[in-house]
Image (spheres, rainbow, N blue to C red):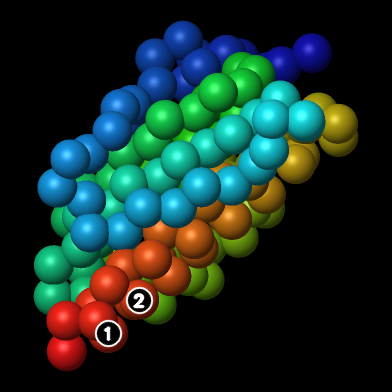
Amino acid sequence: MYNKKVLDVFANPKNVGSMPDANGVGTAGNASCGDIMKVYLKIEDDVIKDASFETFGCAAAIASSSVATEMIKGLTTSQAEAIKNSEVVEVLEGLPPQKIHCSVLAEEAIHAALSDYKCKRKETE
């Protein structure tokens, strides 16, 4: 069902785990569909210095989380906001049609973490 790239990323995911000093945290998904992603961001001077994730879900969900967090490291917040799920799918060299929602969850979790960061920043200004 999964291609070699997805299986490789799933077997060796990067950026796994919580980030205690994150200044942006976002969650996407729900327990009823079985996939939940939580993305942690460390942002300095509007640049994503580090990103990590905790994902409860299938191989596609974990691979999407890993790839997405790798993609956004070093980007500005506005560049990261522009990342689309289709780009995650492209890096993974495709996902089965019934698993495309996993890449959407990665995009949504990143957007939620960026929104959290912006809210926290406004509170301190």
Asked if 86 appears above or below 78 in the picture, the reply is above
**Position in image of residue 22 (x %, y %):** 21, 51
**Position in image of residue 59 (x %, y %):** 61, 18
Q: Which mark is residue 16?
A: none
Distance, label 1 to label 2, CA atoms, is 5 Å
Determine whether, in the image, residue 80 is placed left or right of residue 63: left
Which residue is at 46% across, 10% downward? 11
Question: Is the residue under label 2 in contact with that under label 1 (CB below 8 Å)?
Answer: yes
Asked if 87 appears above or below 47 in the picture, the reply is above
Question: Of all residues shown, which one is farthest toward the front?
Answer: 123
Q: Which mark is residue 122?
A: 1
Q: Secondary structure at mark 2?
A: helix
Which residue is at 62% across, 22% downward? 57
Q: Residues within 10 Å of mark 2 (few under 14, many from 20)?
A: few
Quarter of the figure that contains the C terminus: bottom left
Corner quadrant of residue 60: top right
Q: Secondary structure at mark 1?
A: helix
Corner quadrant of residue 124: bottom left
Amino acid type of the residue that numbered disc 2 sits on in the rendered structure: Cys
Pick the front one: 90 or 20: 20
Disc 2 marks which residue? 119
**Position in image of residue 4 (x %, y %):** 61, 14
Quarter of the figure that contains the N terminus: top right
- Look at the image and tell me whether residue 6 can be seen: no
Which residue is at 51% across, 47% downward? 27
Which residue is at 41% across, 45% downward? 39
Pick the front one: 90 or 121: 121
Amino acid type of the residue that numbered disc 1 sits on in the rendered structure: Lys
- Look at the image and tell me whether residue 113 can be seen: yes
